[in-house]
Structure formats: C-alpha cells, structure tokens
Amino acid sequence: MSLTLLIVQTLNGLQFGVLLFLIAAGLTLVFGVMDFINLAHGVQYMLGAYLAVMFYALTGNFLIALVLALAAALLLGLLLEFTVFRHLYDRDHLEQVIATFGIILFLNQGVKVVWGAAPLSLPIPDMFAGTIVLSPGILYPIWRLMIIGAGLAVALILYLLVSRTRVGMLVRAGATHARIVSALGIDIRRLFMIVFGFGTMLAAFAGVMIAPILSVEPGMGDSVLILAFVVIVIGGIGSMRGAFIAALLIGLVDTLGRSFSIDILRLIMPPSPARTVGPAIASMLIYVLMALVLYFRPAGLFPAKGR
Amino acid sequence: MSLAVTSTSRGRHYEALPVAIFLVLALAPLAAAFGAETYLLGLFTRVMIYGIAALALDFICGYGGLVSFGHAAFVGIGAYTAGIFSAHGITDMAITLPVALLVSALFAWLTGTVCLRTKSVYFIMITLAFGQMIYFVAGSLSPYGGDDGMTLKLRSTLFGFPVLQNDRALYYAVLVFLLASYLLCRAIVASRFGRVFRGARDNPTRMATIGYDVFRYQRVAYVIAGCLGGLSGFLLANATEFVSPSFMSWQRSGELIIMVLFGGIGTLHGAIVGAAAFLLLEDMLGGITENWKLIFGPMLVLIVLFARGGLLGLTQSLWERLRRG
Amino acid sequence: MAEPVPNPVLRIENLRKSFGGLVVTDGVSLDINAGELHAVIGPNGAGKTTLINQISGTLEPSSGAIYLNGDDITALPPNRRAERGLARSFQITSVLPRFSALENVALAVQARSGSSYQFIGRADRESALNDAAMQALTEVSLDSRADILAAHLSHGEKRALELAIALAMQPKLLLLDEPMAGTGPKESERLIVVLQRLKGRFAMMLVEHDMNAVFALADRISVLTYGRILASGAPAAVRADPAVMTAYLGEELE
Ligand SMILES: Nc1ncnc2c1ncn2[C@@H]1O[C@H](COP(=O)(O)OP(=O)(O)O)[C@@H](O)[C@H]1O
Ligand SMILES: [Mg+2]
C-alpha cells in the first residue's frame, strides 16, 4: 500500500519535474543568452494551454490543436519580442521586471476577457485516456506517462541541439561570453529571436501537455513561473543540464514532501499537530532546498562560467 | 544602472517636496470631513501604510541596488503577527508590535544571509521565491483561516486603551509612523552606515578592498527594510481588520516595486508619492472598468520604455524645461 | 608576536593560479621588505594583475601562501586584508562614480576610524574624515577637484584618485597596478614625483610598463613572464641580465 503510493507519487513528481523543465529551459536560455529576466514567460505557458483549448474546440483533434497552438503561441511571442522585449535587452533588470510584470497583468486579464474567468478543460486524447497497470495493483494514468516521455524527449532534443548545432554552439557561447559572441559579428538580434521563439514554444508546449490534467485558468502561469525561477537558480542560470537536474529534484521533493510530510511528522508528534504543521513544512521544502544549495553554491549547481 | 540617482546635493524645491507631502497628509482628514470622509480616510490610510513599505523598498533598492521582489513577505509577516496575536486575544501594541518587528527582522536576517551572497538577477529571483514561500506557508495555516485569511476581532490597543479604534486616530497614528520611518531612512542614508551601503551599490569590489565587509552592511540594511515592511503590515492588519495570504502574494511585491518606480527611485519621499499614485490610479481605473489591468499593464510597459525616472523625474524635467523657458 | 628577525612586509611562497588549463601564476615566490619599492614588470598577459588580485584577496590562488607582516593571509577576504594595512589601486580605474572625489577618499578614511555602524549623523559633515581625505587629495594634487563627482573626473584625475584612496588607508603595503596606464607624459612625470615622495613611508609593489618610472623608483625589480619570475634583483643587475634582455627589456631599452 505505502510502497504503491510511493511509486505513484514518485512518478507524479517526475511528471511535475519534467513540466518544470520545459518551462525553465526556455527561461534559462533566454536569461543566459540575453541577460533578460522575462516574468512573462509564465503567461506564455498559460497561453499555450488556452490556445490548445480553443483550437481543440474548433478542430476536435488534439494533435492539430497542439500544432496550431504552438504556432500561434510562437507568433504571439515573436510579436511581443518585436514590440516590447527587444527594447528591454539593454535595460536594467529592474526595468525588465516592471515591463514584463505589466505584460503579465495585461495577458492574465486579457485571457479573462476573451475566455472568461471560469476554468476550462481539455480532454485527454482517446488514445491515451485511461490507466495502465505498471505492476499488479499499481495503476497509472497514461497521459502522465506521456508527459514524462515527451519531456524527456524534448530534453534529449535540446541536448543534441545545444551540443551539436551551430546555433547551439552560439547559445552556449552566448550564455557565458555574450559580449564576445556579439563582437564576433554574429547577428545577435537574430540569435535572440531564435532563442526567444524557441523558449516560448517550449513553455507553450508545457501548457498544452498539462491542460488535460489541470484546469486551464487565468493566472495559472504565475506560480509555475516562480517555481521555474527556483529551478534555474538551483541549476545555475544559463545551464541546461542544471535546469534539467534541478527541475526533477524540485518536482520530486515538492510532490513527495506534500504527500508524506504528515505521515513522517506523525512519527515524531501526535496526529493533530502533525496535520497542522505538515502542510506548512511541505510548502517550504523546495525553498529550503534552494536556500541550502545557494548557501553552499551561490551560483547554483552548474554555474555558467564567466558570470 | 541608469535608473537610480543618488541626490546628495538636493535642490531647494526638492526639499520643499517632502514637507509639502507631509503637510497634505496631515491636513487631508480636515478636507475629508467635507464629504466622503470614510472613503478618503481609508484611501489615504492605505496610501501611507503602503508608503511605509515602498519607502523601505526604495531604501534598499534605490540606495543599495538591491532589487527585492519579495518585499510583500514582510508586510504579510507583520500583518499575520497582529492577526495571530489577536486570534489569541492579545492586542496590546506594547507586545505585538515589537514581536512583529522582531519576526520580520529574523526573517530578513535568515533570507538575507542566503540572498545577499548572490548577485543582481539571482537576488531578484530568490527574494521572489522566499516571498512565495511565506505566501504558501500562510495559506497552509488552517487554524488561522488558511487561504481565506481571518478577520481581527479588535484593533491593537496600547496599555489597554483602544487608541486605534477611531479611524481618524488610526490615520494620525499611521502618519506618525510614516513620518518616523521617512526620517529614519533619510538619516540612515546620510549616515556613516548609509554611505557604506550606497558605496556598496556603486562598486562592491572597491568597498571590499578599502576594508568593508559589504555583505554584513547589506544584511543590516535588509533587516532594517524588513522591519519597516513588517511595520507596514502590522498597520495594514489594523486598518483593514483582516489578514490573508494575498497580502504577501508576489503581485503585491511587484506592486511595491511599481510604487517605488512611479515615485522615482532613490528619493525616499518619491516612494510615498508613488504609493499614492498607484493606489489612486488603481481606484480610478477600477472605477472606469473592472478590466483596469488591461489599461494598467500596457501603461507600465510605456512608462518603462519612455518615462525613465518615474513621475517625480518626469515632473522635475518638465519643471526645469519650464523654468529655462 | 616577538619575531627574532624582522619579517618582510609581504612574503609570497610558491603561489600558483590556473584558469582551467591556463597557468597564469606559476610558482611565484617573492618578498617585499619594509619601506622597499619593488617593481614587477613583464609583457601584457604575464600575470601581473592576476598576482595583485591574489595578494589583495579578490582572487583565490590555486595553491601557495601569502604572508603579510608574518601572518598568513592566504584565506582572508579582501576587507580583512585591508584592515591589516593592505591597499591597492586597480589597472582599470575602480572608484565610486556617484560619489565626489572627497567622499571616495573619506570612505577609505572612515573604514579606519571608528565604527561604520552609525545610523544617524551626517557622514559628509564629519570634519575629521573630510580633513584626512582632503590631505590625501592634496598629496596627489587633486584637492581643487574635491567636490567633483568621480564619474566626471578626467582619466588622469581618476588615476590620481585611486592613489589618494589608497593613501587614505594609511597602508603598510601598497599595490599599484599600472598607475600610469593611459596617462599623458606630463601626468606620468607628476605621478613619479608623488611616488618618489611617498617612497620609504610604506612598502610598495609597483606594476608598470613605463620604464622611466620603474628605473627611477624601484629598489628591486622582478621580471614576470608566463607567470614565472624570470629574474629578480637590483635594477642594474636586472638590466644587465641577458635573459631579461632577450626576453623582455631588449626592445624597450634600445
Ligand atoms: N578570470 C580569468 N579567466 C581566465 N583567464 C584569465 C582571467 N583573468 C586573467 N586571465 C588570463 O591570465 C593571463 C594573465 O592576465 P593578467 O594577470 O591580466 O596579465 P597582465 O596584468 O600581466 O597583463 C591572461 O592570459 C589572461 O587572459
Ligand atoms: Mg594587468
């Protein structure tokens, strides 16, 4: 019984971690290459989910909805990049924070106006609906396994892109020596646009994938954004490998902490206070983890050199 | 870097401004007596309370270069201290206020120890994360209302007297706290300590090589700002007779930064103007449409792109242009 | 505390520093005695700035030890080294741009006089600090520019301000990283005169490309190439060293 729960929750933690990775990957790339802190990254995840719901309602086909949502999210992202973000790259972090905060306010409200404040949902594609038997007595939703699989696949693709292609090489160089890259006469504007567009798509992809098991509602990107920050801070800003490891770590610690904190506390205190204190401690765990990592390694687990 | 300007040599009309601000605040209740008294008193009380928090943020951000995106956490801590005490029937300020300040200081010291070892954008993200941590912790306090928060049975008392019960008394108490906070910050900025703190923003390496342990000075400043944030929250709980996790949501932290930016960063009194501008604007736009954020969001973007230096900076440059003719 | 033989002010033992695979300080050992002016010369990229960074504590050595007045300071942070009397100037000017020249120096004075955890009272009105700061500015002939923001000073004036800040710390050992870099011949002349006057008051390490300055000022010279000390000794001996002639000095002396 308890072992079953442990296995299921570990998978849930992995699934959450993979989702965080999809969001954090774009964020850490954008930050690493452009030194641009983009709070609006979370609303791009939200937009992905909403667009998928909309296109699904129009087409009735999940795959088409996914592709259209990604394309639309990319267009919207590039529009934002073109009109606002590119004027912010050489500004203070403080100014970047304020301006992108303004965009969050606008888009969260805009989503409410367009789609309403009530939560929406996206059905799981028939093929992947239901559960499978992992081992006797352990059932697990197929869609969650799909998310884990898709996330790991994206991680692999990202790894190949970053380590094997020319753009990837520039991205790696840009994360550590932005000035040198631009001094080499690389069209930095174009590089930025590619990286930014890519990050947007990853966030939107995460939004689409999670929409079938989470309610789609205004502001859904906000708390995820902050968790993504925790991930890239722990992993080391600009480090893809760091983001991956930190995302899985956070996903597991948060999920397992929430499901077992009360049980663990009951070993050392009576049930009633354990039920009160448990959730409070569980909600602090990942931040305490972050504090510990940063106390010993102020630049994160995999610091990008030269920053 | 371009945003913050330390004005060690303030012009004369610059000095007149803080005096004018406090005069207006002192006289506002008299004017309010002629109409819409409860509304105006309430609004200005909130302006002053947020003014204290924004002031504290301007102190570390404008003078120390420490952009904290988690300052609402301290507001929440101050508010919850008042709220939790009140839930247990303890309302005397002589006990509750010092405890609120102490808890805020402790939280600032602990988180500052982690945040301040890191730089610029790490600092922004980590303060944001710690703010979110406190937000979730408050939401998990089911005995104290959980996500919904709780109402206070009674406003704070002082040695048994219900000194804040009357709205006007509360108003002037808040004004006194605001004035004290402002004068304190001003004194600190100009003091030996403040000079080291400001120097650390300009060039931490240089400060270290002339013998200052930059980290310790920054941590002390962070604790001071945290205490003022806690004071603000303590007063907020009294003014609204309610506390909830939303006091410390990350949007609140963002709003505090916006207030500082509105007033023009690194001026102290600007933070008060910024708080007033923000809350009035929120009220005004909110009166026009419930979707006021559709207007406010793009406004922020435009301000960042086109109006560097905030409202005071804007009026000041207009003023100078007028005087030159 | 009582030492049988007088310690050198600075002793470096077998210092090594590498960035990844690049060894930038390769087993450097040297002493600087009280009152001595020790010049370190060497081509660009030889590792002179890296050496100064390690002595002043802004960079951690890979191995080796640094002693200041006999005490091991290898693990101390820069501020603790400054407290013990170590001052430095930076090759790339490093002042507080938004502070006046006087306040830049006054901050250095403040660091050595009483606590800086004073939260009231205007620091810029403390005459004890300002007087001492003004004195340091006068030493480098910058007194007439005391109230100018450091950001608005000319390059040469910023170099002088760097020196004034270091002087105000009343150092026991002063590390100067190319104080004449980028200044005109006139300003260089003036700086040489200033350093000549300061010589003997405290120990100095002077990193400089201007050979006139080096040979006019140095008691001893060490030549650094590829992170190693190639030769070390009295100016005349170093000048005559054939290895130095071919490796470094050759072209510049002819
Ligand atoms: N932080 C660093 N990372 C990598 N290499 C460095 C770093 N600092 C200096 N170097 C390298 O060390 C060598 C010596 O530099 P430096 O000490 O500045 O020389 P010098 O002051 O003698 O001109 C140079 O090749 C430089 O590129
Ligand atoms: Mg050098």
Image: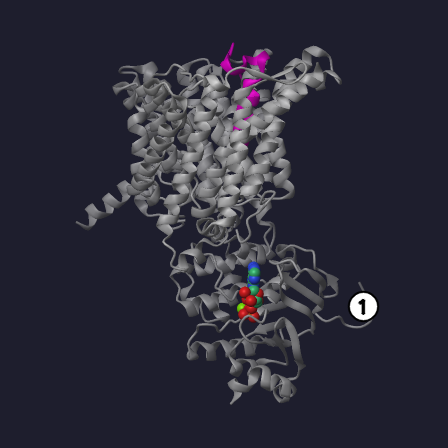
User: Could you tell whether A128 is left or right of A188 in the image?
Assistant: right
Residue B170 appearing in the image: yes
Which residue appears at 55% of the width and 86% of the height?
Answer: C250
Within 10 Å of disc 1 (Cα), the crowding (few <14, some 14-19, many 20+) is few
User: Could you tell whether B134 is left or right of B53 in the image?
Assistant: right
Q: Judging from the image, what secondary structure is the residue with disc 1 in?
A: loop
- The amino acid beneath tag 1 is Glu
The percent position of residue B316, horizontal first and vertical second, equals 28, 43
**Depth order, front residue of A245/C19:** A245
Q: Residue C217 occupies which quadrant of the picture?
A: bottom right
**Depth order, front residue of A6/C108:** A6
Q: Spot the residue most to the right.
A: C4
Q: Residue C142 occupies which quadrant of the picture?
A: bottom left
Q: Is C28 drawn above or below residue B104 in the view shown? A: below
Picture quarter with the N terminus of chain A: top right
Q: Residue A145 occupies which quadrant of the picture?
A: top right
Which residue appears at 32% of the width and 43% of the height?
Answer: B308
Q: Is C91 drawn above or below residue B180 in the view shown? A: below
The percent position of residue A97, horizontal first and vertical second, equals 41, 38
The percent position of residue B291, horizontal first and vertical second, equals 30, 21
The region drawn magenta spans B129-158
Residue B130 lies within the magenta run: yes
Residue C168 appearing in the image: no
Q: Spot the residue most to the front.
A: A127
Residue A8 lies within the magenta run: no
**Mark 1 chain:** C
The percent position of residue B193, horizontal first and vertical second, equals 54, 46
**Depth order, front residue of A284/C216:** A284
Q: Where does label 1 land, which residue?
A: C3
**Depth order, front residue of B322/A36:** A36
Q: Is C52 drawn above or below residue A108 in the view shown? A: below
